[in-house]
Image: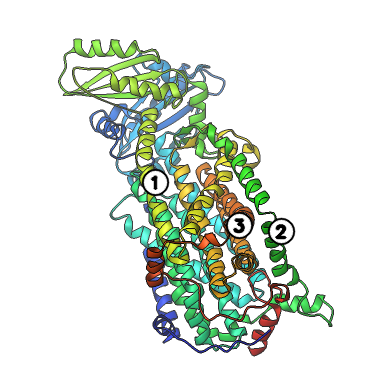
Amino acid sequence: MTEVNRTPRVGGWTRFVTARPRLSLLAALVLTALAVLAGSGVADRLGSGGWEDPAAESTYATRALERAFPDSQPNLVLLVGAGNASVDDPAVAAEANRLTERLAAEPGVVGVGSYWRAAPAAAPALRATDGHEALIAARITGDEKAMGETLDRIAPSYRGAHGPVEVKIGGIVAVRHEMQTTIQEDLVRAELIALPITLILLVMVFGSAVAALLPLGIGIVAILGTNAILSGLTAFTDVSVFAMNLTTALGLGLAVDYALFIVRRFREELAAGADSRTAIGTTLRTAGRTVLFSALTVAVSLAAMLVFPQYFLRSFAYAGMAVVLLAAAAALILLPAALVLLGDRVNALDLRRAFRRRTTKAADPDTAGAEEGGKGWGRTADLVMRRAPFFALGTTAVLVLLGLPFLGVKFGTADDRQLPSSAESHVVQQHIRDGFPGSPGGGLEILAEGRATPAQYADYKQRIAALPEVVRVDGPLVNGDKAYFTVQPEGEAVDEAAQGLVGDLRATEAPFDTKVTGTAAVLVDSKHAIGAQLPWALAFIAIVTLLLVFLLTGSVVVPLQAVLLNALSLTAMFGAVVWVFQDGHLSGPLGFTSPGSIETTLPVLMFCVAFGLSMDYGVFLLSRIKEEYDRTGDHDRAVRLGLTRTGGLITAAAVILAVVMVAIGTSRVTNTKMLGLGIALAVVMDAMVVRSLLVPAIMRLTGRATWWAPAPLRRFHDRFGVSEGGPAAPAEEISGEEPLDEVGETEETRDKATTRG
């Protein structure tokens, strides 16, 4: 391999991050320790809701009813089972009444009622149809944290056997509290799964134990820093506990991506004869710029969730943007400082090379195994570009076909079925769902505001009872100038009929102001809020992504290709989400209960995360293709070399990120499982199919026109654009190149760098 004479060029940023590397790392250690303190216990301050629109009619009505009719808004349910006896048995009734009196005396608990003390009209709804179970209902007051503390305090003394009855605890408070606890436990398990597997994969990719530890360090710094930021945000706004899963996944995954790219380039520069500081300078000018643009594209996709009113989505924007930018900052500040100190020792403990020397013949000790690395990707690129129309049409057809199940998507709300079937609150709600009359939790509630006469209330009640989807109307309960009606619809709580009834109730005229809430109303309002803001979010992602990719490539065509192909790469994820989680296929092996719908905010969240990660890999590939095109002016050669030099890198990064997401997907909470497994599938499809097959095929078809831009935009890019340029090495003939391993290095250059160490 020809040695390249490189003139040392050290820019201002390089001087800044490498001037005092030990001091930089010490400062990072101190800040990380402070982040640990600031972020400790953050999960206890996070909420487990956030799916509703805070400005919606249903949200206003829910809060108003809670204030005006607290006794009629239970959020805690005790399922009292009498075994083989009847709930009307005197001994059962006596024990149930004793439990009811005890619960009514508990601090922070109001509105306690039960089947045994209910009014005759309400009693049938609180008794199971088989007569062996009945309900005690109450309301725990306070904010989410206070309700959780009250539940923790009282639950142990009520749960379990009490004489002739057995008590289980359910209700909205219990569901959310159990969900929060489960997520925290699952997150710890996911980290214990992901960290060692990630380390093993990094050792396999880098071949050096020292180099493999660097991405983990970057990821840990990003995760701990983000936890501290989320902890601070809880003082100003609600933050969802679900966001912690994204923090872990992106913190590890993107740290690996960025460190792979930077460490690989640094090792290449060392192997070419540069000293540590010069190698870092070249690395930051080239790979560093790509990492910066990659982080910005991911952050832009996640920032789009800020336009939605639901704090569930906004929480993922807070966590995602924080962890992405912290991972990039650590990769561009701390990693260069560490590499300057390590120098050639970054190749220490080269386990892969040692293994190959033991397992290959002495005559060819260092090229075995690497042959398939670069040449394998080169052969793939040659095949794809020779058959570009076939691969372009074939992969597009396959991706569209995989996405077809999404056409049958049904949107719903998150409920107890998010939890595993063995979870106590899920068991209680399922018993109520299956064994009690009506559709518990599926009723609609109407808040009437304004003075009215009994006759006006009666007339209004008669008119809404006449609506075709209505089974029963109860009420009104009157408190001053507010009244409360409950409406029981036909069918399921959130099916099309129930959602249609929401519109009919809101359109029914009344001599007072009416507002409708309930499960179906919350869903209708949430869908409306997402539908209203979705075009703005998509436009924001598209426009900023187009601008960033243009600044990187100087082309008008490439950004359009990137956005369209990235969107196409997500079809398999959306199709799989519906086929698996809505339709219930694989629910047994994956261990979840399908509610028959997809929670409304999940597709938005998954799109923003997966699109950002797809752009992450797209930037890696496009930056290298652009560098080769600028160097040679040969479009086809640039595409081939770009895929050859980054195919293994992108695949390795995608596999590691997929492992992290699958670890998150082992969660017992269905939404988290859907997020983890769905994103893992999207990442793998993007790296294995889109980047490896579809992108080079499309770029081959567009040819040199790929790099076209009108003259004004070319001048704009000349002034403001950047690329992974850097000093160029002489172009070798493609057939005569050194074989590249998984991260784009040759065995010769790695051996040379190791020998220097």
- Packing grade of label 3 (10 A; few <14, some 14-19, many >=20) is many
Question: Hey, what amino acid is under mark 2?
Answer: Leu
- Packing grade of label 1 (10 A; few <14, some 14-19, many >=20) is many
For the N terminus, the quadrant is bottom right
**Which numbered marker is on residue 687?**
3
Per the model, the C-alpha gap separating discs 3 and 1 is 29 Å
Q: Earlier in the sequence, mark 3 or mark 2?
A: 2
User: Residue sitting at 40 percent across and 64 percent down?
Assistant: 711
Q: Quadrant of residue 586?
A: top right
Question: Hey, what amino acid is under mark 1?
Answer: Phe
Relative side of 380 to 583, left or right:
right
Instruction: Residue 617 in the image: state x and y as whole percent.
Output: 54, 61
Q: Earlier in the sequence, mark 2 or mark 1?
A: 1
User: Residue sitting at 67 percent across and 88 percent down?
Assistant: 755
Question: Hey, what amino acid is under mark 3?
Answer: Ala
**Which numbered marker is on residue 383?**
2
Give the residue at mark 1: 312
Query: Which one is nearer the viewer's eye here, 47 or 292?
Result: 292
Instruction: Residue 649 in the image: state x and y as whole percent.
Output: 61, 66
Query: Which one is nearer the viewer's eye here, 404 or 118?
Result: 404
